[in-house]
Image (cartoon, rainbow, N blue to C red):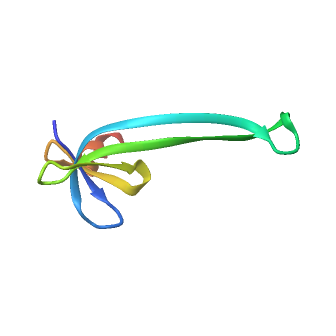
Amino acid sequence: MATIVLHKETGKFYALVGTGYSFFKDSRPSFFGGAIAPHKEEGETKCAAISDEEGTISWVQTSEIKVVEIDEMKIEDILRPYL
C-alpha cells in the first residue's frame, strides 16, 4: 500500500514511509531559584519519514506535508462516501 504525500514548501511528491510522535519534558535548576524554581521546557514533535525517487529517507514535520494518494486513489475519492 503506497501513500503519496506532497511537500507543501517545495511542491515535490514523496512516498510516505512512516510516522513518529515524541513528547519531551525537561527541567534544570535556575540560576537564582535553583531547584525550587527550575527552568522547564516541554513540547511535542510530530514527524513523518518520506522517501524520494532515489530511496533517500528524510524526516519532516507532519504539518509540512499533505496526503495526496493512497494506493493510486486520490484521497478525496476515498473519503467522498463519508462526507
Residue at 39% in and 36% down = 20
Residue at 43% in and 53% down = 63
Residue at 88% in and 40% down = 33
Q: Nearer the viewer, residue 36 or 51?
A: 36
Residue at the farthest front position: 31
Q: In the picture shown, does residue 48 fall above or below 7?
A: above
Residue at the farthest bottom position: 10
Q: Nearer the viewer, residue 71 or 77?
A: 71
- Count all numbered tags in the image, as a single digit: 0
Q: Quadrant of the N terminus?
A: top left
Q: Position of residue 53 (x, y in %)?
A: 12, 54
Q: Is residue 83 visible?
A: no
Q: Quadrant of the C terminus?
A: top left
Q: Position of residue 49 (x, y in %)?
A: 30, 43
Name which quarter of the figure residue 78 lies in.
top left
Q: Position of residue 31 (x, y in %)?
A: 82, 45
In the drawing, does residue 34 fall left or right of residue 17?
Answer: right
Residue at 28% in and 51% down = 76
